Amino acid sequence: MAITLHWLIAALIVGNIVLAWTFQNMPRGLTQFQLIQLHKSFGITVLLLSLVRVGWRLANPPPPAPPMPRWQRLASQGVHWAFYGIMIGMPLSGWVMVSASKLGLPTLLYGVIPWPHIPFVHDAPAASKKAWDDGADFVHSALAWVAYILIPLHVAAALKHQFFDRDNLIARMAPVFGSAKAKEASHAR
């Protein structure tokens, strides 16, 4: 379950980054609107899957990591906590931005499922909505920049563990990289 959630959320986040870069540089129109709707759909899906992942992690702690220097263990924990913040904070801040928007456009997840605005934001006076929008836009942008730094760092650390340290740490989340014996040992922890 953890592996499936990891890769599904990762794919949606990468897809959302590509969508954001694409629609930001487009002229306004139907195509941009559709890409923004897909971006919002991916974001809400990331939020929901991340909440499932948090619940799963609380009920099923991960196996212990292989021995590594303390600084690496602390860095790994910090990056993972930051990813949880991104996976929950970005969709929430995006939802606030949509709810505070002057345009008041609806969100249809995947073009089918209506997603509500946050009532106390959407129904707020114009000045309050502007404050909500400005704050959420700042948080959304800041978390995006943190993600741009952490994603390559996370991938580089996983590759380092796999190919330089050869501790099969990556086999826990990408079983295709580990031998059957390493997978069994990883699952047994």
Image (cartoon, rainbow, N blue to C red):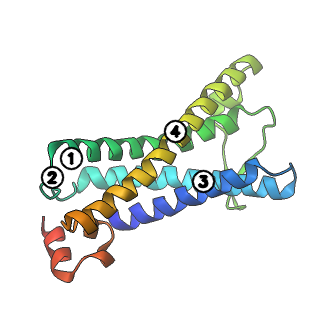
Q: Earlier in the sequence, mark 2 or mark 1?
A: 2
Cβ atoms at labels 2 and 1 below 8 Å apart: yes
| Residue shown at 21% from the left, 46% from the top | 73
Give the CA separation, mark 4 to mark 3: 12 Å
Indicate left or right for 126 with 89 as reference: right
Give the CA separation, mark 2 to mark 4: 28 Å
Secondary element at tag 3: helix
Cβ atoms at labels 2 and 4 below 8 Å apart: no
Residue lying at the far front of the rendered structure: 164
Cβ atoms at labels 3 and 2 below 8 Å apart: no
For disc 1, the marked residue is 73
- Based on the displayed image, in which of its 4 quarters is residue 171 positioned? bottom left
Secondary element at tag 1: helix
For disc 3, the marked residue is 17
The mark found on residue 68 in the picture is 2
- Closer to the observer: label 1 or label 4? 1
| Residue shown at 45% from the left, 52% from the top | 151
For disc 4, the marked residue is 143
Report x, y in % for residue 144.
55, 42
Q: Earlier in the sequence, mark 1 or mark 3?
A: 3
Report x, y in % for residue 85.
42, 40
Q: Earlier in the sequence, mark 2 or mark 4?
A: 2
